Amino acid sequence: MKRRQPGLPVIIMTAFSDLDSAVASFQGGAFEYLPKPFDITTAVELIRRAVDESLREDEGEARAAEMPEMLGQASAMQDVFRAIGRLSQSHVTVLVTGESGTGKELVARALHKHSPRSGGPFVAINTAAIPKDLLESELFGHERGAFTGAQATRRGRFEQADGGTLFLDEIGDMPFDLQTRLLRVLSDGQFYRVGGHQPIKSNVRVIAATHQNLEERVRHGAFREDLYHRLNVIRLRLPPLRERRDDIPMLAQTFLAKSARELGVEAKRLSEAAMAALVAFDFPGNVRQLENLCHWLTVMAPAQVVQAQDLPREVLMPAAVGGGATGAMAEAAGASTGEGATPSRATSVAGTALPTNGHGHATTAGAAEMTWVADLQREARRRLESGEAGVWETLCELFEGCLITTALDVTHGRRIEAAVKLGIGRNTLTRKIKELELKV
């Protein structure tokens, strides 16, 4: 069926739900795998999602084919785009600053692509990744016999980039003595190969990048002040991802689509809760970390729709594992019950994320979700440490009861609609109401 109509979503329904059949289904291009027994409402909702996805497929493929080199709707990124546009007819030296993973090389490539030098080569070198003894030869080349092992003349990166752009990444880590040679090239426009005696003319535009504070390194004597001023003609600061959270949904969808194309599978989709968790996370590794996470989800998430619980632990509980969220979520969780207070049963399970809790927290959806997860963890710890028996059953009953009563409140008592919203069958909902003795 997929060979005949590639855009048609196929759902595999089977009574024999083992690993081999599940793997074979997805390898064959199945949209989802539905083992028996299942609720009719669950199957209908699954079909509805498959239809919606097929209607969006053509539009998604068109967007992927036209994916721009850089993405960003946040005002800070728009400033960067405008700066690249203004520099499009310039040969001036540019210094790109920003944390690791913010996309400094992408900016350098964009500056090259939209410059008068776009027909020339773009050569990149990470000055921090090459040993000091080899870096000089890498940059300027060497003559035959210049040192042990130099069996032939070698062109350096400055020669390779002639007529184009040389991107010097992590310039803040360049050894001090090599900074002097780089300054001379930028000042005089010529250099010597290692062991050479003939000056070589340099027709190269230099774009440098660093995640370090160069002003501070200048004050500490680790970076030449004259080189700093030579490089800092035009500075572009790339914002960290936590300063452009509005871009996270768009970037995540793009990276999920990219990973799916690379792996030859259907692109995963993020649920609202999972997306809220990503938006709330600080991403210390910035865009690179988000891209790696989306690749991990493409491989490891168990279903086509990624739920919040499918995300890595450091995203869900950043404060607990020392992640990059700076403890803001943990502080919000503490504020919901008060410092040192014992949270009530309802609050510890529902937290501030449920509309019936009455707290009226002014937090984002992602922060609210992290709050109730932290509350649940704290309540579980309190019960476990007190030696209480049956903690699993007690908390599960509270959790399920809170979900059901809230869903019925939202749907004004309509059980079928509540079941659909919760993603369970009507019979399951009815059975749970009886088991939990809920007064609804």
Image: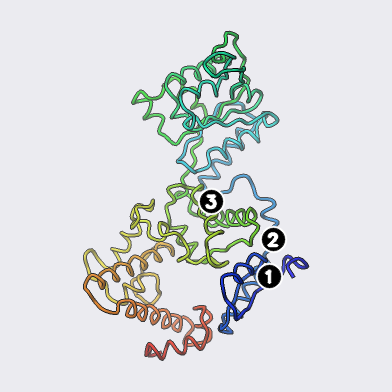
Of the residues shown, which amino acid type is indicated by label 3? Glu
Disc 1 marks which residue? Answer: 9
Snapshot quadrant of residue 367: bottom left
The quadrant holding residue 89 is top right
- Callout 3: 10 Å neighbours few (<14), some, many (20+)? many
Q: Is residue 299 above or below residue 398?
A: above
- From the viewer's perspective, is 124 left or right of 217? right
Q: Which comes before the other along the chain, label 3 or label 1?
A: 1
Does residue 17 lie above or below 282 as drawn?
A: below
Residue at disc 2, secondary structure = helix
Q: Locate residue 318 relative to residue 161 in the image: left or right.
A: left
SS for callout 1: loop
Residue tagged by mark 3?
291
Above or below residue 214? Residue 310 is below
Mark 1 packing: few (<14 Cα in 10 Å), some, or many (20+)?
Answer: many
Q: Is residue 204 left or right of residue 286?
A: right
What residue lies at 38% left-to-right and 53% top-to-bottom? Answer: 325
Residue nearest the observer in this picture, 290 or 338? 290
How far separated are the C-alphas under marks 2 and 3? Answer: 22 Å
Identify the residue at horizontal 68%, vertical 72% (top origin). Answer: 10
Of pointers 2 and 3, the one earlier in the residue sequence: 2
Residue 265: x and y in percent read: 64, 60
Three-letter amino acid code of the residue under disc 1: Pro
Q: Which residue corresponds to mark 2?
A: 59
Front disc: 1 or 2? 1
